């Protein structure tokens, strides 16, 4: 596809404007990029550079595939190789790579969750961003209500988010073509204002870049989560695996010995068993023995690994203490924060939150159900508030005001009646 575009761009870059067609039927070829630019070499050079990157990736992929085939076809021969500083460094890099991948598998999903918030509230609020927030809230509610079902549907959820993001990017980008707004109006029977609320409007180049950049990065984050972090994340969140993880991280002498063995894997020359040492003395000469002796680099690596595991033990103890502290006080914190939010915005919708936690605070068995109901109800409030920000919602159509009473039918003064919200003008239903 890239070579075809480069070839067409090369032809249209010639000084053949009278001879080359400008339209095919009703469609202008300029929308396909077939137009002579002011500086054709710059456009063609950029396209060739982009094509070159894909060619390099393809070549690297083919070479790795052929290399794997050759390795699998090679005959296995027992070979004893003396450990060197180079192999030790490779082992160290392998251990560091596993640590980094474990960190990403545990915390990359938080980046994806944060990107949900960024995509939903960046720029103008439109329908496709509300759908992002709806998907995020559905995932959170399912996580709290049914954890087992959440784990089963998590991969389907990520595929759904990836497919939806691709659809959004294609729709927003193709809407910038010259005739596509007319196609959308004829197909959906929507007005320009309604299409704008959907997120389909024509932007300038800078606005289009900003509107596509954030969903594009979000798509990349979701693909990384799906292909590289999902399987280890599912292993970490498996309830059958939690007990084993606690045993492994239990601060004991046995765990310290295990970690020293891990250091020994990075520096095999230091952690050889007695039998291996005797075999090595019998099978290798004096030169190989000198090469197997620990170097300064190996000692530094060993010391760094010991310090790292000590820091990991301390961090785990602190994390365990904080979790236990939260287990004791989380209900009180949630109840206090919920009531504070309801008091900051006094409305009928927030009254349900106060009622739920007024019952959940004294009754222990009601707390879990109150927490689930509060999560679901807050999700409904968030979606309703986001929908209320759309341009198609006109508060004047839903607003109303009370009939001002006569002076002899109320005890309120005339000044109080004039300043009252009920009689001063139409009341926005959002205030209720």
Image (cartoon, rainbow, N blue to C red):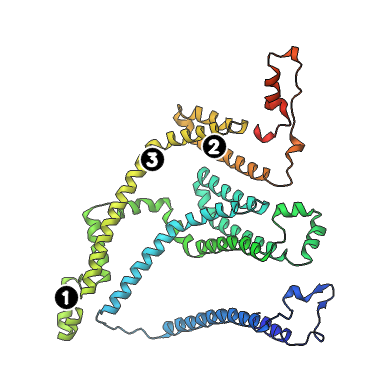
Q: Secondary structure at mark 1?
A: helix
* Side (left or right) of 301 relative to 415: left
Along the line of sight, which residue is nearer the eye, 305 or 143?
305
Q: Are marks 2 and 3 in contact (CB under 8 Å)?
A: no
Name the residue carrying label 2: 374
Question: Is residue 285 visible from the viewing direction of this image?
Answer: no
Q: Quadrant of residue 262?
A: bottom left
Q: Position of residue 210 (x, y in %)?
A: 61, 61
Q: Residue at x 42, y 83 (%)?
A: 71
Name the residue carrying label 3: 326
Q: Secondary structure at mark 2?
A: helix
Q: Position of residue 281 (x, y in %)?
A: 15, 80
Q: Which of the two marks, 3 or 1, is nearer to us in this view?
A: 3
* Side (left or right) of 249 relative to 344: left
Query: Who comes first in sequence, dot 3 or dot 1?
Result: 1
Along the line of sight, which residue is nearer the eye, 178 or 57?
178
Which part of the image, by quadrant, shows the N terminus? bottom right
Q: Are marks 1 and 2 in contact (CB under 8 Å)?
A: no
Q: Residue at x 52, y 43 (%)?
A: 145
Q: Position of residue 217 (x, y in %)?
A: 55, 63
Q: Residue furthest right?
A: 25
Residue 115 vertical placement versus 274 (above, below): above
Residue 296 vertical placement versus 416 (above, below): below
Along the line of sight, which residue is nearer the eye, 238 or 61?
61
Q: Quadrant of residue 205?
A: bottom right
* Side (left or right) of 87 relative to 209: left
Q: Tell me how far mark 2 sits from mark 3, CA to CA.
A: 19 Å
Q: Tell me how far mark 1 sits from mark 2, CA to CA.
A: 65 Å
Residue 400 vertical placement versus 50 (above, below): above
Which part of the image, by quadrant, shows the C terminus? top right
Q: Secondary structure at mark 3?
A: helix
């Amino acid at each position: 596809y890239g070579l075809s575009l480069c070839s067409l761009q090369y032809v249209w870059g010639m000084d053949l404007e009278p001879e080359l067609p400008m339209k095919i039927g009703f469609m202008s070829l300029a929308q396909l990029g077939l137009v002579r630019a002011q500086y054709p070499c710059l456009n063609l050079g950029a396209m060739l550079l982009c094509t070159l990157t894909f060619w390099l990736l393809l070549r690297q992929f083919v070479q790795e595939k052929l290399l794997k085939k050759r390795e699998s076809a090679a005959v296995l021969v027992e070979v004893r190789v003396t450990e060197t500083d180079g192999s030790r460094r490779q082992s160290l890099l392998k251990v560091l790579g596993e640590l980094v991948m474990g960190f990403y598998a545990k915390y990359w999903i938080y980046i994806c969750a944060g990107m949900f918030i960024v995509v939903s509230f960046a720029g103008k609020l439109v329908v496709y961003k509300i759908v992002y927030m709806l998907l995020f809230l559905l995932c959170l509610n399912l996580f709290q209500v049914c954890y087992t079902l959440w784990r089963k549907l998590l991969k389907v959820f990520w595929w759904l988010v990836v497919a939806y993001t691709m659809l959004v990017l294609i729709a927003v980008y193709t809407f910038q073509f010259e005739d596509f707004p007319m196609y959308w109006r004829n197909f959906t029977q929507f007005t320009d204002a309604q299409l704008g609320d959907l997120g389909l409007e024509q932007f300038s180049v800078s606005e289009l870049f900003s509107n596509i950049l954030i969903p594009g990065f979000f798509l990349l984050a979701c693909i990384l989560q799906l292909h590289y972090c999902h399987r280890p994340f599912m292993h970490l969140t498996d309830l059958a695996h939690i007990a084993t993880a606690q045993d492994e991280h239990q601060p004991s002498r046995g765990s310290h010995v295990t970690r020293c063995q891990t250091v020994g894997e990075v520096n095999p020359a230091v952690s050889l068993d007695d039998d291996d040492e005797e075999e090595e003395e019998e099978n290798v000469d004096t030169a190989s023995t000198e090469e197997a002796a620990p170097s300064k680099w190996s000692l530094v690596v060993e010391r760094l690994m010991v310090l790292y595991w000590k820091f990991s033990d301390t961090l785990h103890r602190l994390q365990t203490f904080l979790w236990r502290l939260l287990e004791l006080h989380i209900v009180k914190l949630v109840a206090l924060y919920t009531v504070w939010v309801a008091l900051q915005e006094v409305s009928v919708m927030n009254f349900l939150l106060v009622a739920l936690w007024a019952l959940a605070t004294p009754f222990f068995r009601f707390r879990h159900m109150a927490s689930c109901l509060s999560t679901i109800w807050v999700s409904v409030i968030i979606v309703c508030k986001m929908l209320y920000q759309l341009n198609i919602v006109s508060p004047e159509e839903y607003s109303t005001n009370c009939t001002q009473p006569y002076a002899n039918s109320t005890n309120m003064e005339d000044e109080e009646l004039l300043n009252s919200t009920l009689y001063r003008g139409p009341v926005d239903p959002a205030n209720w």
